Image (cartoon, rainbow, N blue to C red):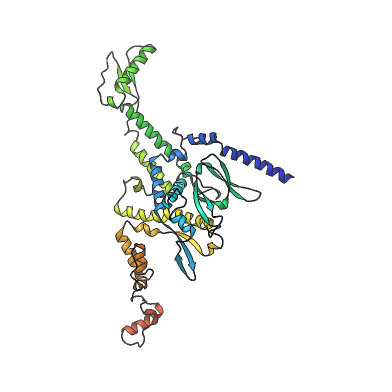
Amino acid sequence: MRRKGYFRRWWEQRSSELSNLLNPKQWFYDLLGGSAKTSSGVRVTSSSALLNSNVYTCASILGGDIGKLPIQVFKKRGSGLEKDDSHPVAKLLGIRPNPHMSAYTFKELLQVHLVAWGNAYANIEWHESGPYNGQPKALWPLDPSKTDVHLDPLTGELWYATTLPSGETRKIRAADILHLKSISRGGLKGITPIAVIREEIGVQQAQKKFLGSFYANGTTTRGILKVPGSLDKPAKDKIRDEWQKVNSGLSNAHRIAILDAGLDYQSLGMNLDDAQFIETHKFGIGEVAKIYKIPPHKLGLMDKATFSNIEHQSLEYVKSTLQPIITNWEQELIYKLFTEMERKRYYVKFNLTTELRGDSSSRAQFYREMIAMGAYTINEVRELEERSSIGELGDKHFVSLNYVSLDKMDQYQLLKAGLGREAPKGGESGG
């Protein structure tokens, strides 16, 4: 009985939370900022943060880089592997995840959700009949601001609550949801990066408002007009209105003010150099770039950029930024889109070789080394370059005659000196 009472209290509490979660007024309040007010006085939410140029650029970079990378399905066959383009998962991730989106748009959208909200969700629609019964049919992205994850403390069941564009609320089981998440406190839901840089974004937004007001007022700063005597309120209002009418606005910028009747103007503000606007602006860019692990030069911060360190940062970006994101995607896709039996034979993998497409010399060097060490055949290289096969001769693997195992070294040296009778088996070139 006590257990039942605890469950009832827990369910009422969770139902109340769910009601607030799905309350349109609450969502509208959250959209306007809710409790996300910063010290600068600007409210910053995940939705509004995307309108910040630095956050937008990071979302565009990460979303575009993930969107352009092909996701390939591989099948284990004996001791080897083969790419399987006929599997339903391959078609979803490589061609069309749903009737309304290309594979690029789908991947880009989920990555942008991950950047701004720290979580990306997609509902998995399954085939219910036919030859593909039980396999994924379509992937439908969900609004991350209207989707939440719940864990039943009694049964351990994980489920999701979401609001569809029609306004309908749905409870969805965990097996039907793709959930990509950033770093988190408990592993169930990611923390939005916007929460970490909310203050910096607030300062940047406040700067823009200040600059807008600054130019709207003809680049004049706040000040006072001194008069030799005392004035009543109507006289003060009239002088203030006349001053603003003549000196405010871009059309009046740089006009010469004429002061009569003993008036004296004294500025009370700081110019932009004194306020260190440029330094503050650069600091904001650096903070946003740091949170998303984006090289500063990609955000236009070129102060300390050189050709050599940009090249190094680009390689570091692939290893430290893209690789963890890709691993996150791959593990979730493998677990959610394949059955338990299929996971023993199938897996998905991003093809990072497309990162070399824009650099022909780096691509040529990579292929040269892979052929020299026997890892790639000529036909495999031609396939990566979308060229036709050159026949059976292109399927052979080659290794250099300069390579020989240590245990064959003495015999190999004797053979070269003409003292040996047989060629060492380990020192021959494979063809």
Q: Considering depth in this image, is 112 or 122 the residue closer to the camera?
A: 122
How far from the left and from the top, in percent, is residue 388?
Answer: 34, 66
Residue 22 falls in image quadrant: top right
Compared to residue 120, the image places residue 23 above or below, namely above
In the shown orientation, is residue 248 left or right of residue 182?
left
> Residue 107: x, y in percent?
44, 51
Residue at 30%, 16% (x, y): give it: 263
Residue 398 appears in the figure: no
Which quadrant of the rendered structure holds the N terminus? top right
Q: Is residue 382 left or right of residue 337?
A: left
Vertically, is 314 above or below 239?
below
> Residue 195 at what x, y percent from top left?
48, 41
The front one of 393 and 302 is 393
Residue at the farthest right position: 1
Q: Is residue 184 visible?
A: yes
The residue depicted at 42 percent of the width and 51 percent of the height is 102
Residue 140 position within the rendered picture, expressed as x and y whole percent measured from the top left: 50, 48
Q: Which residue is most to the front?
A: 130
Q: Nearer the viewer, residue 290 or 87?
A: 87
Q: Quadrant of the C terminus?
A: bottom left
